[in-house]
Amino acid sequence: MEHFSINCDQMEHFSIGGEEAEVSRTIRDEAPTHFQLRIKSFSLLSNSSLERYYSGDFEAGGYKWKLCLYPKGNKDKNGEGHISLYLEMSETDSLSPGWEVYALFRLFVLDQLDDKYLTLQDAKGRARRLRATKTQCGFDRLINLTQFNDPTNGYLVNDTCVFGAEVFVHRESVTGKGECLLMTAGPVTCNYTWKIEKFSQLVQEFHYSDIFNAGGHKWRVILYPKGNGEEKGKSLSLYLELNQETTPTLLPDPGVYVEAQLRVVDQVNCNHQENELASRTIRDEPPTHFQLRIKSFSLLSNSSLDRYYSGYFEAGGYKWKLCLYPKGNKDKNGEGHISLYLEMSETDSLSPGWEVYALFRLFVLDQLNDKYLTLQDAKGRARRFRATKTQSGFDRLINLTQFNDPTNGYLVNDTCVFGAEVFVHKESVTGKGECLLMTAGPVTCNYTWKIEKFSQLVQEIHCSDIFTAGSHKWKIKLYPNGHVEGKGKNISLFLELNDSTTVLPGQGVYVEYKLRLVDQVNGKHVEYKGENWFNDSTKNWGRREFLSLSSLREASKGFLVKDVCIIEAHLLLIGAIGKLGP
């Protein structure tokens, strides 16, 4: 039998890694604050049949952690030829449902000759989010095995190596426990239907379904016909329960992990009501921060526009906007509904690793009764916004059949009103709003700009002739050698509202457009599609890295023929945006 010895020295702290493209590698003198893993006879570990090794647990930031080491590399993450090293949370079963931990971490390899540590961390210093479905994060290619095995580099000396970790969390609060997840041999599925007759005659506070079997355990559905807890008297409450009488099928402490869906069946229209995390209430007060009034909603709904972004508004010291899908967000199973989301805007100026926790409510106005249908998280939880998730909201805000029925008051004279309230850590904003007025019909405009002697362009910026679309004047702006991050590598191309004075103060023009660079040989054009609104403060939109200069100049690709370049602008839809009056 093969043997290898492992010696662990504990310390306190932690650190979170990122994708290989986002890794910062530095050298430092200080030893890892929280944990070190020393491995003797590393060659025996590497040559054994063991693909990965888990260290013992250590504590940092009030949580328990461990290292996961792949001595030959994690093949599932393209780590061959490298050592792969990950930080993993341990003993998370005592944490609250839906738990999340944000941690900045660093992982280390010791150069034993110089007594210095190769240190890897996220290049932008961002914290990473760990949760029940993702308890591990780290580096697929920590260090190249050739570099690691070379004794002159000091990482492997006398067949001994040392790894380490630092972890920095937001708070220290949890004492960990452990668990073993035993997956079933195959997915166990169960469909159970509970038919309740004489529903109106139910008088008890709650009712149980018959007991049914799934995965070797017994279950039942609990119904509160008149609601439970804060929903009492307002909603029907429904729960899935592991039947108490059968808990001897479980040993002390373990549990059963289940993905479940509860549904109240619509027996007529098949618009079934499934369990969701949204609370729906009615209130008199208008939204505190923002209202969006849309006139000629049918034109918006029938246009080719999948989604519409409102203008910005401020709340809690940040800028926000609404994202509306008038026909539903198909990617989120929102068909047959209106989908509405809150999105953070202008986040580039925020510090790396920024996070904003916000409790928000979204609204639809019943114009007949002057009341607002109000949606928010059912448990009143704040949502976390960050660089990788700037948007949150409701895939099924309201059923389109219900919304379009004029007797419900949500759509009156083809006009509707949505709203938003956003509460961050403090409330400091005076609300404002906007009105979107779609044009009576789609206004289309096709403009072609033929540029001769392209190679002789010497100025930084070149503009097309001015053309008219939707009673406004436009032009195309070209940077032949690129602009900002595209400079020297790409051409940059923008559509610009030429005379913003045609727009009243505080108003804008909403445009769905395409910018296209024509392939004159093969017909394989390069194009950019945008959906933006243009006003006196934001006159142009486009792409800084439209096409690489090398591709532009490659004769076989057809973008430059006899030193002629052809650019097209196609304005697909235009609407007017203005401030919402008192």
Image: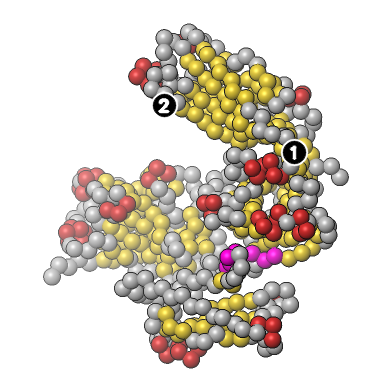
Disc 2 designates what residue? 524
Q: Work out whether 43 lies above or below 476.
A: below
> Does the magenta-highlighted stretch encompass residue 354?
no
34 over 122 or under it: above or below: below
- Name the side, left or right, on which 303 lies relative to 132: right
Say whether residue 319 is left or right of residue 161: right
Q: Is residue 565 left or right of residue 45?
A: right
Element type at marker 1? strand
Q: Mark 2: which amino acid? A: Lys
Q: Locate residue 357: give its quadrant.
A: bottom right
Q: Is residue 410 above or below residue 273?
A: above
Residue 83 x %, y % = 28, 52
> Which residue is the site of mark 1?
437
Q: Earlier in the sequence, mark 1 or mark 2?
A: 1
Report the front residue among 503 and 95: 503
Which quarter of the image is occupied by the N terminus? bottom left
Local packing at callout 2 (Cα closer than 10 Å; few below 14, some 14-19, many 20+) is few
- What stretch of residues is rendered in magenta? 270-280
Question: Percent x, y for residue 270?
Answer: 58, 65
Percent from the top left, x then y, of residue 323? 64, 47
| SS category of the residue bearing label 2 | loop
